[in-house]
């Protein structure tokens, strides 16, 4: 079973309240790449797309998590032994 990693998915709603303060809300979304031994997110963009790496029985891979879907990717170049997204 893979290690579950919590990522802070920023779905912010910013607006002035009646007191003049800004209101911001955040959503924490737990996720793990299916069949991964570990999942490590490394960056998130303004649209909520998350990139990172995961480990499985065949090694280290990159991933994109966007709109509830994982897209794994691998770069195979001579001499490359690891990948980071």
Image (cartoon, rainbow, N blue to C red):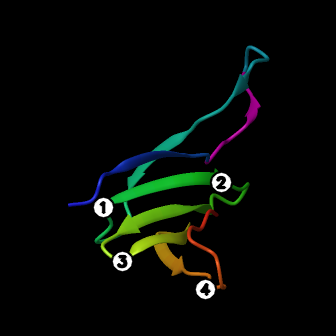
Point 43% across, 50% down: residue = 29
Tell me the distance, in whole angstroms, between the alpha carbons under discs 1 and 3: 10 Å
- Reading the chain from its start, which is encountered first: label 4 or label 1? 1
Residue occupying the point 30% across, 73% down = 57
- Residue neighbourhood size for the residue with mark 3, other residues' Cα within 10 Å, grouped as few (<14), some (14–19), many (≥20): few
Residue 14 highlighted magenta (yes or no): yes
Q: Residue at x 48, y 53 (%)?
A: 40
Residue 22, placed above or below residue 44: above
Residue 37, label in figure: 1
Picture coordinates of residue 47, whole percent (x, y)? 69, 60
Query: Callout 1: few (<14), some (14-19), or many (20+) C-alpha neighbours within 10 Å?
Result: some
Q: 14 and 32: which one is in front?
A: 32
Pinpoint residue 72: horizontal percent, then vertical percent.
50, 78
Question: Element at badge 1?
Answer: loop
Tell me which numbered mark, 2 or 3, is placed earlier along the sequence. 2
The magenta stretch is 11-17
Q: Quick check: 17 left or right of 41?
A: right
Upstream in the sequence, badge 1 or badge 3? 1
The residues bearing labels 3 and 4 have C-alpha atoms spaced at a distance of 13 Å
User: Which residue is label 4 attached to?
Assistant: 76
Task: Say which mark, if any, is on residue 44.
Answer: 2
* SS under mark 4: loop
Residue annotated with mark 3 = 58
For discs 2 and 3, the disc positioned in front in the rendered view:
3
Query: Relative to 44, is 26 on the left or the right?
Result: left
């Amino acid at each position: 079973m893979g290690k579950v990693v919590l990522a802070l998915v920023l779905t912010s709603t910013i607006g002035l309240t009646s007191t003049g303060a800004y209101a911001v809300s955040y959503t924490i979304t737990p996720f793990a790449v299916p069949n991964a031994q570990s999942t490590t997110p490394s960056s998130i963009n303004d649209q909520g797309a998350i990139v990172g790496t995961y480990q499985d029985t065949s090694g280290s891979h990159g991933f994109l998590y966007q709109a509830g879907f994982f897209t794994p990717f691998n770069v195979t170049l001579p001499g490359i032994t690891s990948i980071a997204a």
